[in-house]
Amino acid sequence: MRNIRAKTFLLAGALGLLVLHLCKDFIDHKTIHLPIDVREGHSQLQQHATKTSYTFSWTRCQQNMSAANITGFSSLPGGIKDFLYYRHCRHFPMLMDLPDKCGGPDKSAEVFLLLVIKSSPVNYERREVLRKTWAKERLHNGVWIRRIFISGTMGTGFEKERLNKLLELEQQEYSDILQWDFSDTFYNLTLKQILFLEWMERNCPNARFLLNGDDDVFANTDNMVEYLQSLKDNDGSKHLFTGHLIQNVGPIRSSGSKYFIPVQIQESESYPPYCGGGGFLLSGYTALVIYHMSQSIAILPIDDVYMGMCLAKAGLAPVSHMGVKTAGLHIPSNALDGYDPCYYKDVLLVHRFLSANMYLMWHRIHDPNLKCGPSKKRLKEH
């Protein structure tokens, strides 16, 4: 009987230790959000952001079956239905992390311009060209430019496995990818932004400025650094959000449009002012403001509009920069070369470039022998 009691005692002790370990593991992965008034200034944001922040990675986010009870749900396209079923899901397992990308939270202020580039797993060629051109990590004008690609997953089975392996190989060579286990689709672009901002608050809270853009834009990051350095009284600790300003527009209700937003997602007929999602510049302060505002705003699948919604809730506004051309660059005549480097030498960003043209243009605008006539005027910020 004594031996049985002893064994029972040992078993109970072992189970107790296991429970304690599991509880600790849960605590170490739970997301902790503290209330904060973003209008109290950047110092409080910095103080909050450098506190220990943990992410609880949900292995599976349950489908919200009640979405099917929404009026008119059955007539919606499949992609919209899926969005509504999983709209509440904001936490996904992280497959690739870069906790020391900015040198840790305490040293992250040394990153002057953080390039945050949205890239799907299949876009290997785009990432390779960007690493050799405008997204090359370097010291420019005395300040550091750093690069991060943010991605989800694509495909199923062997295809998903192959694409994940491709990113793993890139990560081994370049250490520049953040990846989460969610489906990398158009409707999840906003989710991708939120997950990045959560990562930033934890690992890079004091980065001065960010370029947030697609992997098919041509970005003159040298010009961006010089523009940001020219700002008066803003070292990243004050509000900045600038790009191709879009305002006085609302949801597209045509179901055939890529940007279709039915009333089941948003009833309002208007959007707040926002900047085109191909690429925009923002301060580190504003990035953290957007993240905190996002915690109480339902996800909208149009990510650039969602950024504008977060700004509006914080009482902030985006502004226009004439050097950001997310709708493309207007060339005055068809008789002129649309890829003349003189048109691109002084802009900040132009959307939609093929990889080969991207590579060529970057080298052409840096050609010391490039001569540009007075008819190709320098584009300046308003």
Image: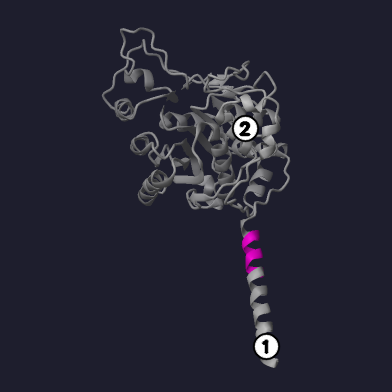
Residue placed most toward the observer, 169 or 80? 80
Mark 1: few, some, or many residues within 10 Å (few <14, many ≥20)? few
Q: Which mark is residue 239?
A: 2
Q: Earlier in the sequence, mark 2 or mark 1?
A: 1
* Residue 360 place in picture, x, y as percent: 29, 27
Residue at 67%, 48% in the rendered image? 48
- The part of the image, by quadrant, that contains residue 121 is top left
Q: Which residue is most to the left?
A: 369
Give the SS element for disc 1: helix
Q: Which residues are magenta?
A: 20-27
Q: Can see residue 314? A: no
**Above/below status of 21 relative to 243:** below
The dominant secondary structure in magenta is helix
* Residue 268 place in picture, x, y as percent: 69, 21
Q: Are marks 2 and 1 in contact (CB under 8 Å)?
A: no
Q: Which residue is most to the front?
A: 74
* Residue 250 place in picture, x, y as percent: 63, 18
Q: Which residue is mark 1?
A: 4
Magenta run includes residue 232: no
